Image (cartoon, grey):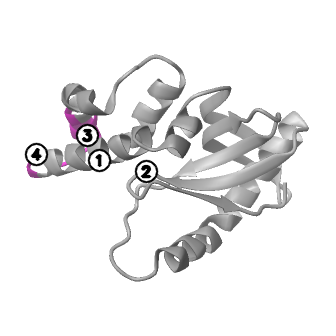
Amino acid sequence: IVHRWCQLISDGRVDVAPDELGNLRPASRRWAANLGVANQDLDAVCDRTEAALKGILGDEKGRWVLQGKGQAELPVTGIYDGQTQSVVIDRVRIDEHGTHWIIDYKTSTHEGGDLAVFLEHEAERYRPQLNKYASLYANLTGENVRAALYFPLLQEFCEVSVEG
């Protein structure tokens, strides 16, 4: 649901301020119900969705991810490791230098402990996925690619080195 809203915001089809996120709740509830979320869990899912959107909209780097040149929920198909692979990239953001950033949203949270260590573990965990995305995208476009994870609930942008 967070990804859907981020796509609509990035595509310019929804313009919402952080203090207006409650206006999205009816659509979020409907989407959650259609995805099979139990009635007793709908409010929790909507609360988490609103918290994630508030995080990304309230963060300068988060707004940078959503706004500007690029594409959201981009389907890409190509050959990776000798096999045809199809993926959907959460966000391709082209920066002011023409660099193509592949950004994967992660709605996980982190309680206690060392945040830097958590982000490092998440980077390692998702590096294979981002390598695949970067390779497929670079082969399709011929562009140099950088990759990152963005955590809306933590307001953290974590670059991940990839083999584009």
How far apart are the two marked residues, 1 and 4, measured between alpha carbons? 19 Å
How far apart are the two marked residues, 1 and 2, measured between alpha carbons? 8 Å
Give me the residue at 46% from left, 26% from top. Answer: 9
User: Which comes sooner in the sequence, label 4 or label 2?
Assistant: 4
Query: In the image, what residue type sits under mark 4?
Result: Asn
Residue, disc 3: 32
Give me the residue at 58% from left, 50% from top. Answer: 104
User: Which comes sooner in the sequence, label 1 or label 2?
Assistant: 1
Give me the residue at 63% from left, 27% from top. Answer: 68
Q: Give yes or no for contact between labels 4 and 2 (Cβ–Cβ under 8 Å).
A: no
Secondary structure of the residue carrying tag 4 is: helix
Q: Give yes or no for contact between labels 4 and 3 (Cβ–Cβ under 8 Å).
A: no
Magenta residues, start to end:
29-40
Q: Is residue 84 visible?
A: no
Give me the residue at 67% from left, 59% from top. Answer: 159
User: Which comes sooner in the sequence, label 4 or label 3?
Assistant: 3
Image label count: 4
Packing grade of label 1 (10 A; few <14, some 14-19, many >=20) is some
Residue, disc 1: 51
Residue 161 in the image, given as x and y percentages of width and height: 76, 63
Residue 154 in the image, given as x and y percentages of width and height: 41, 58
Residue, disc 4: 39
Packing grade of label 2 (10 A; few <14, some 14-19, many >=20) is many
In magenta segment, residue 37: yes
Q: Nearer the viewer, mark 3 or mark 2?
A: 2
Q: Quadrant of the N terminus?
A: top left
Query: In the image, what residue type sits under mark 3?
Result: Ala
Packing grade of label 4 (10 A; few <14, some 14-19, many >=20) is few
Residue, disc 2: 152
Query: In the image, what residue type sits under mark 2?
Result: Pro
